[in-house]
Image: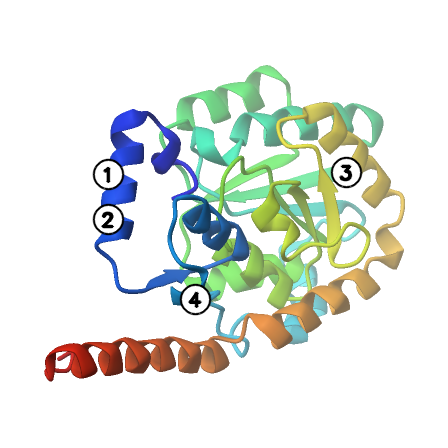
């Protein structure tokens, strides 16, 4: 909805057609909802449903232990879990880190996952002499992702387009504040200076400034992490949010039953 619907006239018409044929819409953030409304979909038939995360698995309880196990205790440790794709601004992530590392040497970043830009990512790291500061750990199971988020000082995402990012919510649930691009969906979760910090989308220099600023307050990050965790407890608890999803199914089922006498199966 946030990217494909605006690709060209064909995709716009396809989006309009699908919405016109739909009885109800589930959106994972207000940004998606607003886009659907702009396409003419009725506000009253949209449920905003952030998927949420498992707050027992993604928890801040083991932060000190995991940091000790993973190391870099005297450095600012950044965790990056987004795919290495153009839409996620991986080039901005790397450039911003590189600029910041020239000013603050004690920076480290763990990058999980991979993607179509693997050659560019690894080439950038090697050509800029960052192999001792940027560490590739590949794809990991949820338990290990939680461990890296628990160990990190801050989470980083330079995404250009997104809904309610589960990766962001996972890090916040672990008590890890975030540095994110200032796209609308990110700002639904991160208020600058509260649960983390926002930088101008696509601006590597502004990202670098935020990293340098956060490095200068490394010993004061606990409060931001607590605010991030609290935000997920209030709004991104999967156990609570799934009830909203089920309620929506019941509403649509009742609509179908009343109009045709046959409920959804």
Q: Residue at x 74, y 63 (%)?
A: 225
Pointer 3 or 2: first along the chain: 2
Numbered tag placed on residue 82 in the rendering: none
For this rendering, which residue is in front, 99 or 66?
A: 99
Residue 116 in the image, given as x and y percentages of width and height: 36, 29
Q: Residue at x 45, y 44 (%)?
A: 38
Q: Residue at x 63, y 17 (%)?
A: 128
As drawn, 250 above or below 153: below
Residue 158 in the image, given as x and y percentages of width and height: 59, 37
Report which residue position mark 3 lands on.
Answer: 211
Report which residue position mark 2 lands on.
Answer: 18
Find out whether the residues at labels 1 and 2 contact each other: C-beta distance under 8 Å. yes
Q: Closer to us: mark 4 or mark 2?
A: 4
Q: Closer to us: mark 4 or mark 1?
A: 4
Label 1 SS: helix
Pointer 4 or 3: first along the chain: 4
For this rendering, which residue is in front, 33 or 65?
A: 33
For this rendering, which residue is in front, 214 or 36?
A: 36
As drawn, 145 above or below 227: above
Instruction: Locate the N terminus and report the quarter of the image it occupies.
Output: top left
For this rendering, which residue is in front, 112 or 234?
A: 234
Spot the residue most to the front.
259
Report which residue position mark 1 lands on.
Answer: 14
Find out whether the residues at labels 4 and 1 contact each other: C-beta distance under 8 Å. no
Spot the residue most to the top.
127
Q: Closer to us: mark 4 or mark 3?
A: 4
């Amino acid at each position: 909805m946030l990217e494909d619907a605006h690709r060209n006239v064909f995709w716009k018409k396809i989006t309009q057609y699908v919405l016109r044929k739909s009885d109800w819409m589930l959106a994972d953030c207000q940004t998606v909802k607003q886009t659907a409304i702009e396409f003419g979909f009725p506000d009253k038939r949209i449920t905003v449903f952030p998927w949420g995360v498992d707050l027992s698995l993604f928890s801040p309880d083991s932060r000190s232990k995991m940091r000790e196990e993973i190391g870099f205790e005297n450095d600012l440790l950044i965790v990056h879990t987004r795919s290495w794709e153009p839409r996620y601004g991986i080039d901005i992530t790397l450039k911003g880190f590189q600029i910041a590392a020239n000013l603050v040497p004690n920076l480290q970043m763990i990058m999980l996952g991979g993607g179509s830009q693997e050659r560019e990512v690894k080439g950038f790291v090697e050509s800029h002499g960052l192999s001792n500061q940027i560490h590739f750990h590949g794809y990991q199971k949820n338990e290990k992702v939680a461990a890296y988020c628990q160990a990190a000082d801050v989470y980083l995402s330079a995404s250009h387009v997104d809904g309610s990012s589960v990766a962001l919510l996972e890090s916040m649930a672990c008590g890890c504040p975030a540095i994110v691009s200032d796209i609308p969906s990110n700002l639904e979760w991160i208020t600058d200076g509260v649960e983390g910090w926002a930088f101008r989308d696509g601006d590597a220099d502004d990202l670098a400034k935020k990293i340098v600023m956060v490095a200068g307050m490394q010993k004061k990050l606990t409060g931001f992490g607590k605010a991030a965790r609290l935000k997920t407890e209030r709004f991104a608890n999967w156990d609570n949010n799934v009830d909203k999803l089920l309620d929506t199914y019941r509403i649509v089922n009742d609509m179908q039953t009343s109009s045709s006498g046959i409920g959804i199966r």
